[in-house]
Amino acid sequence: MRARDKAAVSALRATLGVLDNAEAVPADESQLRGMAIEQSPVGAGAAEVARQELSEGGVVDIVRAEAAERLEAAAQLTAPAHADRAARLRAEAAVLLGFLDEPATTR
């Protein structure tokens, strides 16, 4: 990837963030509710839990959803003043879909 490809960098950073959030373990509010501060876990890593592992299909679904979201947003930007933003969203979607179309061994 070229160092100056802003659309690709933007799309990949945002999608990596979404994937990272998808791997997060939801906080169990029932355990936290009513807990006094002196009963809470203390120390570095005391509250750490293993992250969820996404399947390859799950990752593909998320990347496709991110691309679809960008294409939908670009379709809604019909005013000439928003042409640049719509083009950028389409370029970001193309980057994401390009990763799905390539065989995994070529990257």
Image: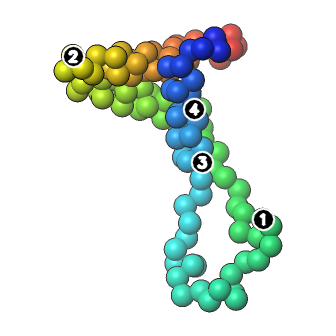
Task: Check residue 45 in the rendering and tell me which mark sits there, or answer none.
Answer: 1
10, above or below 29, in the image: above
Q: Which mark is residue 56?
A: none
CA–CA distance in space, label 3 to label 2: 39 Å
Q: Quadrant of residue 34?
A: bottom right
| Of 12 and 60, the residue lying toward us | 12
Q: CA distance from mark 2 to mark 1?
A: 51 Å
Whole-number angstrom distance, CA of label 4 to CA of label 3? 16 Å
Q: Position of residue 65 (x, y in %)?
A: 41, 32
Query: Spatial distance from mark 1 to mark 3, Cα to Cα?
Result: 18 Å
Name which of mark 4 and mark 1 comes first in the sequence: 4
Q: Residue at x 52, y 74 (%)?
A: 29
Type of amino acid at the residue the image marks with label 3: Glu
Looking at marks 3 and 2 on the same chain, the residue that comes earlier in the sequence is marked by 3
For this orientation, the residue located farthest to the left is: 79
**In 3D space, how far apart are the residues under numbered discs 4 and 1 (Cα atoms)?**
26 Å
Q: Earlier in the sequence, mark 4 or mark 3?
A: 4
Q: Amino acid at mark 4?
A: Arg
Between the residue at mark 2 and the residue at mark 4, the CA separation in whole angstroms equals 27 Å
Q: Which residue is mark 4?
A: 13
Q: Say if mark 4 contacts mark 3, CB within 8 Å.
A: no
Of mark 2 and mark 4, the one earlier in the sequence is 4
For marks 3 and 2, give the one nearer the viewer.
Answer: 2
Q: Can residue 59 be seen at all in this image of the molecule?
A: no
Q: Which residue is mark 2?
A: 80
Residue ranking furthest to the front? 81
Q: Which residue, given by chain and number where applicable, does mark 3 sit on? A: 23
